[in-house]
Amino acid sequence: MSATEPVHGDTEQRGSWEDVRDLPPSAKLVAKVLEYNDTMTQQEIAEETLLPSRTVRYALNRLDEQNVIDSRFSFSDARKRLYTLEIDG
């Protein structure tokens, strides 16, 4: 990462539900699950949605492209990431 690239979350604008509207059904489901559960790992999302881990990973990538989720490393297990829904309005 170069010095001119923004750090994730610094200058990026949050997405909205309008940004989620045209995403695949799996991404919409993951967004709704995160809306009701605050912060979850990829494995927790997969268990809650009954989607395969690969599908959850794809959905999370699509949501990240739309700036509607935030991810950070877990303090309890640095191998895992925690995902949170970040939608304005």
Image (cartoon, rainbow, N blue to C red):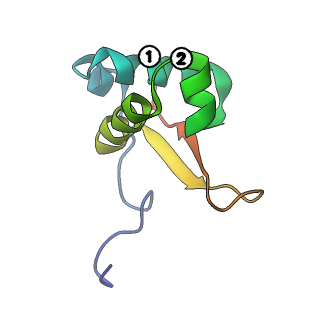
What residue is pinned by disc 1? 29
Front-lying residue, 7 or 47:
47
- Total marks shown come to 2
Label 2 belongs to which residue?
Answer: 49
Residue 13: which disc? none
Name the secondary structure under disc 2. Answer: helix
Q: Quadrant of residue 39?
A: top right
Query: For the residue carrying disc 2, how many other residues have a C-alpha within 10 Å: few (<14), some (14-19), or many (20+)?
Result: some
Q: Quadrant of the N terminus?
A: bottom left
Q: Residue at x 35, y 47 (%)?
A: 13
Name the residue rendered at 47%, 33% in the picture: 53
Q: Looking at the image, which residue sits at the far left?
A: 22
Q: In this rendering, is residue 72 above or below 48?
A: below
Q: Is residue 76 above or below residue 43?
A: below
Residue 64: give x, y in percent of width and height: 36, 43
User: In this rendering, would 69 be left or right of 55?
Assistant: right
Q: Residue furthest bottom?
A: 3
Question: Mark 2 and 1 residues: CB-CB less than 8 Å, in contact?
Answer: yes
> In front of the other: label 2 or label 1?
2
Q: Nearer the viewer, residue 87 or 43?
A: 43
Q: For label 1, count other residues whose C-alpha is less than 10 Å away and answer few (under 14), some (14-19) or many (20+).
A: some
Q: Is residue 68 visible?
A: yes
Question: Which one is in front, 71 or 49?
Answer: 49
Outermost residue to the right: 76
Label 2 vs label 1: CA separation?
A: 7 Å
- Using residue 80 as the reference point, say whether residue 31 is left or right of it: left
Which mark sits nearer the N-terminus, 2 or 1? 1
- Look at 47% across and 23% down and name the residue there: 30
Any part of residue 34 in sight: no
Identified by mark 2, the residue type is Thr
Picture coordinates of residue 17 (x, y %)?
36, 21
Circle 1: residue type: Leu
